[in-house]
Image (tube, rainbow, N blue to C red):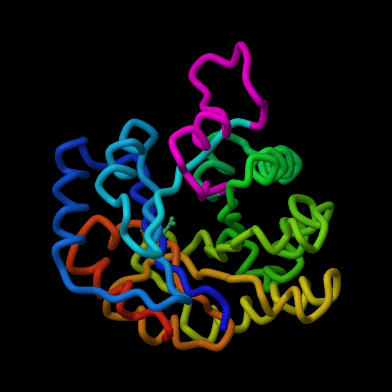
Amino acid sequence: MRTQIAAANWKMNLTLQQGEALLDAIIAQPHSLNANQQAVFAVPFPYLAMAQQKLAGKQNVFVAAQNCYSKKNGAYTGETSVEMLQSLGIQYVVLGHSERREYFHESNQFLAEKVNICLEYNIRPIFCCGEPLSIREANTQNAFVAKQLEESLYHLSAEQLQQVVIAYEPIWAIGTGKTASSAQAQEMHAFIRSQLAGKYGTAVADSISILYGGSVKAANAVDIFGQPDVDGGLVGGASLVADEFVAIINALKK
Ligand code: PGA
């Protein structure tokens, strides 16, 4: 069974004190993660150390950064290197979120560089892909997503690709309350897996976790995560509410 992941993406939300209280409330609630399940918290940079400390020793629970820079170190004021993240014990980084692609103009090529440096430091990228509404309306979403995968990931070896988690996040479903139907999610996830199989073979494609993102909440998580090619979710808004996120963790496939 592929690893099933409930990943929280706090984005640019919460104060330090609110973040601490949220993690405390989540930890306090009963949730059980099987060997094949993980909970990941992508928190803002200033809270990484706090989250690492609070979640230390918790089985199958990881802290993620929401971004990193593509260079090892140097005169890049305001940026955060993968080496810095590694020195904090961080094991995941969200890359290529549509908000970074849109507001910070991150291209597929630039993201390929970030993927490379993460893998060099043994940090696993949660690589986001997904189409805007205009592309969905033109029914060209498959070609759009295929190009994102090709230009950012297909230079990797099979072993490297297996360190990558993919998150499919249709932009029209992010923060809009409009979720892709579970059938739409399954259709795209199966397409992504078939593309990976075409490039790397079925065994490799079958081992890669593909998360769905876009208005996942407690009320729809069981249905979406129940799809055969959906291996969990990347969750924004609902990850800021303890009860919601605990229910989402508990909705992962066993
Ligand atoms: P949302 O965000 O759950 O608030 O739609 C998901 C994401 O952007 O990762």
Task: State which quarter of the image contains the C terminus.
Answer: bottom left
Above or below 9: residue 6: below
**Viewer-proximal residue, 136 or 102?**
102
The answer to which image quadrant residue 73 occupies is top right
Going by the picture, which residue comes out furthest to the front? 57
The image quadrant in which ligand 1 is located? bottom left
Left or right: residue 90 compared with residue 24: right
**Numbered label tally:** 0
Task: State which quarter of the image contains the N terminus.
Answer: bottom right
Q: Residue at x 36, y 44 (%)?
A: 43
Left or right: residue 34 compared with residue 117: left
In the rendered image, residue 217 lying in the magenta stretch gets the answer no
The percent position of residue 114, horizontal first and vertical second, equals 66, 39
Above or below 86: residue 137: below
Instruction: Please identify the dominant SS of the magenta region.
Output: loop
**Viewer-proximal residue, 180 or 123?**
123
The magenta segment: 70-96
Q: Residue at x 77, y 71 (%)?
A: 196
Going by the picture, which residue comes out furthest to the top? 75
The percent position of residue 79, horizontal first and vertical second, equals 52, 23
In the rendered image, residue 85 lying in the magenta stretch gets the answer yes
The percent position of residue 183, horizontal first and vertical second, equals 53, 87
Q: Residue at x 59, y 62 (%)?
A: 165
Above or below 88: residue 245: below
Q: Residue at x 33, y 49 (%)?
A: 10
